[in-house]
Amino acid sequence: MDRLEFATITELRAKLDSQEISVPELIEFFIKRCNEFDPKIDSTLEVFDLKSVLEQFRAQGTPLSGIPGLLKDNICQEGRITSCASKILQNYVATYDASACKRLKRAGALPIGRANLDEFAMGSSTETSAFKKTKNPWDVSRVPGGSSGGSAAAVAAGLVPWALGSDTGGSIRQPASFCGIVGLKPTYGLVPRYGLVAYGSSLDQIGVLTRSVYDAALVFSSIAGYDLRDASSRNVQKKDYTQHITGKLPENLRIGVIDNVLNAQGMDSEVSAAVEDAIKVLEKAGAKIKHVQLPTLEYSAAAYFVISRAEAASNLARFDGVRYGMRDKSAQSLHDMYLNSRHDGFGEEVKTRILVGNYVLSSGHAGQFYENAKRVQRLIRREFKNTFNDVDLLIMPTAPSPAFTFGAFDVDKLQMDLQDYFTCPMNLAGIPAISLPCGMTKNKLPIGFQLIGPHLSEGLIFQTSHVYEQNTPWHTMHPENF
Amino acid sequence: MTKISKEEVLKIAEISHISLREDEIKPMIKHLQDVLSYAERVQEIAADIEEPLNKNVNVFREDVIVQVQPETILAQAPEREDDYFVVPAILKTK
């Protein structure tokens, strides 16, 4: 390890245990780093003061004890603002900890701030945040991806060793890919959603962003497992996922390459080449590569648009300016107060998604859009299930291109929505997927690929990802000037 | 290609409890049409698939009271009076 800021959690743990550095010193170091370097990339909405962070410190002798991180600002932290990067919740103070936050605190981890995001996690560039546009630390003229863009940029720039994000259609994996780090979207229901501000409840999942696979497994182990407060929580007990990291692949591991995806229209040639290289690395490490077709994937984005917007319209109906949040105080009637508060409080992207959602659910259109989208979702699930009879994991790019420039899709917003093309099928199927760095473009922009497994295959995903990581240099590269 | 009229977008906005300014209507129509025209393709293959099974199950848990200080919640109110949330008058005075 050369520099403390890019140390892994295990390396930080060793320094704390050998008393080379104390917990308050370590936290102070990272808070200072955020204050010094975050103005370059605007990845945080708030960095807490040292005293209030240390007051939260409880557990000793655990792997995450005293290790600082960031939470995407749609995950509640008791006594702190949870804004969802929206004006409507600008001053909303969470009255309880999200289950994932509470579990991390119990494990001794210390959230030191709130990470920026696309408003209500709706976007693929973090440009729809009502407060600031996060920059990609590899090239500040480009976006970090989204919606967990603040979390990804902060981890990539060495402002924190870990961050939590949420992934409804790719919001952890695409920014992880754009920023050259590891991002895991777990199996639906494995990490409790209690305290995650809902966007598309049947698709939303909290996950982790880190610079190494082992660190991802470590943080994930502390947040995964059954929670009675989340009705969609899976009955799976807590376990230590780092046990799966053995340093070698399982015998006869079969990895499926999705041919129709790698040859998809609009794929950047440097991305295709990097993913082809990743396949070769895994093959050389002993995996059997099989070629498969998943034709329904071409309909995933359409089904995802319909289902996610429908659920968003329903979930965001609660923001009415009555009990909390922004209110238009000039309105003369209750009805006008609702209409104006929501008009002024929500940004353009959020309003559009709510309108799309109510359109596809409205009588006369629900049959054409919503019900058909749910049928397509079933087909996608079945297709994945059948494919996993023949292969153990699937591999495909995370995004069609490396990070794009600010405003690139201001005119053609549909192209922005299609950033979810390679990531949303897994949300529709509820299966886990990880994005791993697998190359750099000529212009020094990171490229990522996904390893995808059946439900609850996180152990195998970590095991395989770790082997890939140990055979490649990408995780050791960090952006300059940080 | 899904076409949306001005009346339709205003109706959906009303259902959504979101007011739209005159200058916001046209861009909103375009955005809705773009997304919906793309989303239409779900029809192409959905016809061959049987109805989704209704597999929803009720999930129950003990009804345990979690104590929260009313003041913590009420402190977030945009407008309040004692222990009540205040909203603009619902009934018109003569």
Image (cartoon, coloured by chain):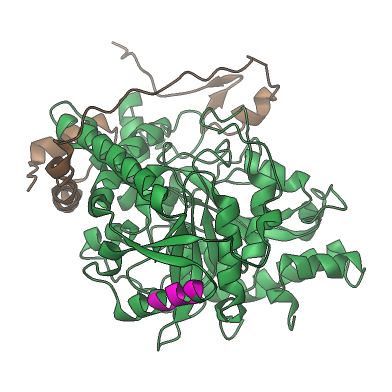
Q: Position of residue A458 (x, y in %)?
A: 56, 51
| Left or right: where A98 falls relative to A104 | left
| Left or right: where A80 falls relative to A274 | right
Q: Position of residue A223 (x, y in %)?
A: 65, 45
Residue at 35% in and 81% down: A270
Q: What quarter of the picture does the N terminus of chain A occupy? A: bottom right
Residue A340 in view of the camera: yes
Q: What secondary structure is the stretch in magenta mostly built from? A: helix
Shown colour of chain B: brown
Please name whichever residue, A232 or A319, is drawn nearer the observer in this view of the structure: A232
Residue at 17% in and 38% down: B46
Q: Is residue B52 magenta?
A: no
Among the 4 quarters of the image, the one containing residue A215: bottom right
Please name whichever residue, A305 or A353, is drawn nearer the observer in this view of the structure: A305
- The chain letter of the green chain reads A
Q: Is residue A319 above or below residue A434?
A: above
Residue at 27% in and 67% down: A409
Residue A112 in view of the camera: no
Please name whichever residue, A291 or A340, is drawn nearer the observer in this view of the structure: A291
Q: Position of residue A54 (x, y in %)?
A: 81, 54
**What stretch of residues is rendered in magenta?**
A276-283
Q: Is residue A280 magenta?
A: yes
